Amino acid sequence: MAIERGSLVIDPRPDERAFASTSVDLTLDQTFSVFRKSPAGINISIDPALEGFDHDAAMEQITERQIIDPNEGYVLPSQKLILGWSAEYIDLRKDPRLGARVEGKSSLGRLGLGVHVTAPTIHAGFDGRIRLEIINHGLIPIKLRAGMRICQLIFEVTLGTPDKGYSGRFSGQNVARKG
Amino acid sequence: MAQVKIEQVREGQHPSEVVVAVRTADGGSEKLVVDRRSIRNDALDVGYPVGEDNDRLLVELPRESMRGLWRVWVKRDSVD
């Protein structure tokens, strides 16, 4: 319904089997990042609270972009973390009350596969692909394939009206605008 | 809906992503990763300013900055 109303965009649109009453399954993009191994004898650490810390630049230094082999897939070893993305682009900007959480699939969870690390919230006003922190908590390697159903978005509607994103009649009435 | 001016800094980790910088009122900048589709005319949607103080406006970014901030003070003339 939200898609038909235009308050939610998912591109490409998942097929009908991906939808449930309050959720939609998303699939795994072919691009992912793996953490580089430190050379022998070199210990590095991350200091995210340091003034001027550039998270994305740091990630560029310590990770390496890879593409999931379309035939072989990518085997995620036990206890390993990689960064992935949803294949779908999500746009929540049209409805300022609509937010979401990204959660795993129970069928994958039982294998030990997690898709986020403490940050499941997709804020109202978000647009983009969903970044996934994919970790194999299990003891057995798990093969990942591009296009597999990797996570689900569970939609939430905020109570009240957020300051950001609301473009209705009373928006910005308490704040003087330029011009 | 208001838009805040940004500068594109570099490619993001995913081909769909771009790192952008928002110039803050104190002369610094806040960097964040956004989708390419989020950028229109070198600006980002920020809803409506959530605060003001003389020539500054407090805007809420569409994503958390790399320093973990959602809201930043920007100069009024950087918001259209």
Image (cartoon, rainbow, N blue to C red):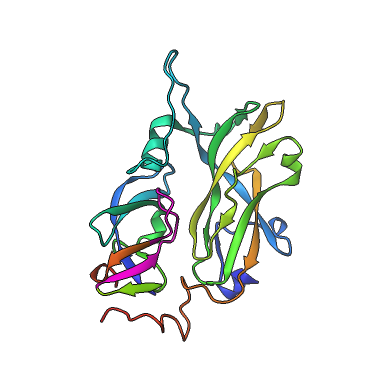
In magenta, the rendered stretch is B55-71
- Nearer-the-camera pick, B71 or A96: B71
Q: In this view, does B51 lie to the left or right of A135?
A: left
Q: Is residue B40 visible in this depiction of the protein?
A: no
A134 left or right, relative to A67: right
The single residue placed furthest to the bottom in the displayed view is A169
- Image quarter where the C terminus of chain B lies is bottom left
The N terminus of chain B lies in which quarter of the figure?
Answer: bottom left
Which residue sits at x=58%, y=68%?
A98
Asked whether A126 or B64 is in front, the reply is B64
Q: In which quarter of the image is residue B76?
A: bottom left
Is A85 included in the stretch rendered in magenta? no
Where residue A4 appears, x then y in whole percent?
Answer: 61, 72
Relative side of A126 to A154, left or right: left
Residue at 44% in and 51% down: B68
Q: Main secondary structure of the magenta part?
A: loop
Q: Is residue A102 visible?
A: yes
Residue shown at 40%/52% (left/top)? B65
Horizontal and vertical percent for residue A32? 51, 37
State the residue at coordinates (63%, 26%): A77
